Image: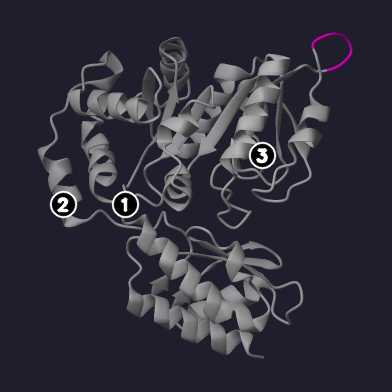
Amino acid sequence: MADLRSDTVTRPTAGMREAMAKAAVGDDVFGDDPTVNALEAHVAGLFGHEAALFAPSGTMANQIALQLVVPPGGELLAGADAHVVTYEVGAAAMLGGISTRTWQPDGAAIDVEVIAGMIRPAGYPSVPTAAIAVEQTHNLGGGGVVPLATIKHLRAVADKHAIALHCDGARIWHAHIADGVTLAEYGALFDTLSVCLSKGLGAPVGSLIVGSREKIARARVIRKRLGGGMRQVGILAAAGRYALDHQLQRLTEDHERARIIAEALAPFGVIDPERVRTNLVPLDLSKHDLDAPTLAARAAERGVLIAAMLPQTARLVTHLDLDDEAMDQAIEVLSDLLNT
């Protein structure tokens, strides 16, 4: 099977497994696992922040970060198709008591002035806005990269209104590689970030919350409350550190394969290759006879797995385990199916 459903389907490489097997471990709830402590310090340093905290999933990392910057009853502003709104099963409201208000989505193309106009100050009867969330790269926006200038503008707006700026940075590594913006530049603009190790980087498990020392101390309590306190987690942290050391720069290969796929499928009117910046290839089927679930089902019958994200939107994702042979197989099968 050529599996392009997500970059979460990768398996640990031999070198990563070896690193996991050799990892020095301790009890992380007591704070004495040396491997996870080293990973947290390393990632915090990459983003220019004081501290970081390992969490078992991106959703938990996001929800911890949101609770750090939005008090119960406070308001979060985010895009209507943001992961924290659409794919975290109402966790912000259920777990954090957070009220969410959204702007009309357009992927990574964010209108800062629209967001600025949405901010509500404290005072009866409105719900006060406490934070803005940005997704980098943008999942439903086809892996689009929010420009650095846009984020700087948002930072200025947040500062003006004394509210926080959070980055759902599940694939921020891809933005770093695509635009050449350093991780420290991104880190300087956000109060909190969540960054994922188990997508493009290819680790089996894990995300980190990044922020100030005070925030991460609070995050550790919230993580325990959510059931995320783990023991000899250095085995997993070793995989994440290996991924950062050995599998970050190779993301350029995933970007190149995504662009090749987009260019091959462009003649069928379902994708604009110029919009493919990273490793996500969204197929717009709104003008095609096939809908996304049907295309996905028929492709699977022929050994190619893709994701039906919305009724008229399918998604292909390139990743560590997708080689040229699998890419060519996907192009051949999808071209045949779309040529109807």
Q: Residue type at mark 1: give it.
A: Gln
Looking at the rendering, the stretch of residues picked out in magenta corresponds to: 122-126
How far across and how far down the image is residue 336, in percent? 56, 89
Question: Element under label 1?
Answer: loop
* Up/down of 187 relative to 206, above or below: above
Residue 23 is left or right of residue 250, and the answer is left
Q: Which of 327 and 116 is in front in this view?
A: 116
Residue 88 is left or right of residue 201, and the answer is right
- Residue occupied by mark 3: 85
Using the image, tell me which numbered label, if any, was put on residue 333: none
Q: Which of marks 3 and 1 is nearer the N terminus?
A: 3
Give the quadrant of the C terminus. bottom right
- Identify the residue shown where x is 31% and y is 56%: 250
How far across and how far down the image is residue 60, in percent? 49, 32
- Identify the residue shown where x is 37% and y is 42%: 197
How far across and how far down the image is residue 184, in percent? 42, 31
Q: How far apart, in angstroms, are the residues tagged by discs 1 and 2?
A: 16 Å
- Identify the residue shown where x is 55% and y is 55%: 143
Q: Which of marks 3 and 2 is in front?
A: 2
Q: Earlier in the sequence, mark 1 or mark 2?
A: 2
- Residue occupied by mark 2: 15
- Residue occupied by mark 1: 249
Question: Element under label 3?
Answer: helix
Q: Nearer the viewer, residue 254 or 12?
A: 254
Asked if residue 219 lies in the magenta stretch, the reply is no
Structure colour scheme: one colour
Q: Nearer the viewer, residue 321 or 148?
A: 148
